[in-house]
Amino acid sequence: MSYPKGLPLHTIWDDIVFLVESTKDLLSLALACRTFKELIIPDHLTYRHIRCDIRRKELWRLLESRPRLARGIRSVELAEDSTLEDVRLPEAWGNSNFSYSYRSPITNENMTLLKNSISHMTSLREFTWTQFPESIHKVINISDVLTSSASRLEGLSIRAYLSPFRSSYLRFEKLSVWTLTSLKKVVIHNPNQAAIRMVLSCPDIEDLCLWDLPSGCASHLMQNANWKRLRRLSLGTDEIPISTEDLSMWGVQDKLIKSFLQCLKLTHIFCHFPVTEVDYTSLKWESLGDLCERLSSVRTLTYLEVDLVREITNVKLTRDENGKYTGYQSVSLKEAGGQPQSWTDIFLDLNPQRYS
């Protein structure tokens, strides 16, 4: 890095501090030198990770007006303050007056301020947005917000709890035409076609979660994906059969799934089946075993979780040294003293060493 003559020494030191990634290393540097301490605390130390509500306009205005401050931010997590266990803001902002109605819509001003702020975040690596439908009343263009930083992102999570007919409110069009080689982790709820194209353009994904996939999207992904590094896969879809009758009807589709899984080195799989798409009254444990047998061809798999609608807290299947299933254990919610509920988790642990 070269500097023009006459550049203030303060600016050079600020650039050095900017390159330090670890918070622990920042603290060590601050303790070692008073000059660095004045640079690091508070600006560099407290403006590395932001977790707050998008409607905090004054924060985004500050970051928009101070590019050197914004450039050090590594992660941004947006959600309603009331839903966050820990709002991460510089101390001055944490105690500032901030209030809004739970149903207050996200405005064009909110989006513009956010976009302009992120345009200065040249070190942004993770972007997370969790939003509930009460505050989403118009199109939210994720592409526009992330245009300046998308090529550097390593993690992208968009959790917008929208009904399928409102999923078009989230726009990914510009991102879908890029090859996002840095992206390692992707979580998207209610992905539309542009979001699917974006995911397929990310060759180095390691952790992928797509919730409430539109009909036909799971098959499209399996036919076109080329994720050599994928290790964790979570799909919310009705396209993976779990009953014996479904299995007998699949044929070519079943071969597609097996071929897709065998090409990967997955260690974790999570399957979620929409309650409206599966007849759980006819589901038998033998059917569940069939599903596990089909997935057992993934020799690297150590964990499989299937989300179902039953009065069961968990199921664990064991395998012998030859990889054959030897039995399972189940716990009823009623037997455990709990109350029946519509959504429960079934855990299928396919690592026999855990039971040795």
Image (cartoon, grey):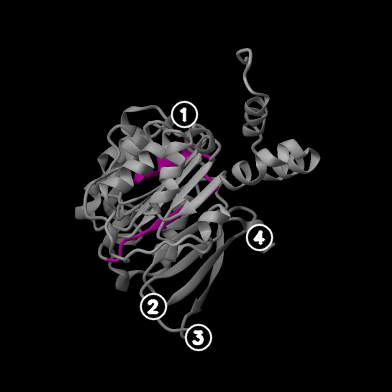
User: Identity of the amino acid at label 2?
Assistant: Gln
- Label 4, on which residue? 354
Label disc, if present, on residue 335 of the rendered structure: 3
User: Distance from label 1 to label 2 (Cα)?
Assistant: 41 Å
Asked whether the residues under the numbered discs 1 and 2 touch, taking CB atoms below 8 Å apart as contact, a structural biologist would say no
Vertical relation: 6 (above or below) 102 = above
Q: Residue at x 51, y 69 (%)?
A: 315
Look at label 1 and name its amino acid. Thr
Left or right, 109 with respect to 29, comes to: left
Identify the residue at image location x=56%, y=52%: 90
Q: Which quarter of the rendering shows the C terminus?
A: bottom right
- Give the class, few, some or many, for how many residues have Cα within 10 Å of label 3's Cα (few <14, many ≥20): few
**Cβ atoms at labels 1 and 3 below 8 Å apart:** no
User: Which portion, as a residue range, is magenta?
Assistant: 254-275
Which residue in the protein does label 1 denote? 181
Q: Is residue 354 magenta?
A: no
Rendered location of residue 280, percent (x, y): 32, 70
Gap in angstroms between the C-alphas marked 4 and 2:
29 Å
Q: Mark 3: which amino acid?
A: Glu
- Of the 4 image quadrants, the one containing the N terminus is top right
Picture residue at 63% right of the left edge, 45% below the top? 45
In the image, residue 321 sits, relative to residue 108, either above or below, namely below
Label 4 or label 1, whichever comes before in sequence order: 1
- Which corner quadrant of the image does residue 116 belong to? top left
Q: Earlier in the sequence, mark 1 or mark 3?
A: 1
Give the quadrant of residue 112.
top left
Mark 2 or 3, closer to the camera: 2
- Residue at coordinates 56% horizontally, 60% vertically from top-left? 349
Q: Quadrant of residue 186?
A: top left
SS for dot 4: helix
In the rendered structure, does residue 257 fall within the stretch colored magenta?
yes
User: Which class describes the residues within 10 Å of circle 2: few (<14), some (14-19), or many (20+)?
Assistant: few
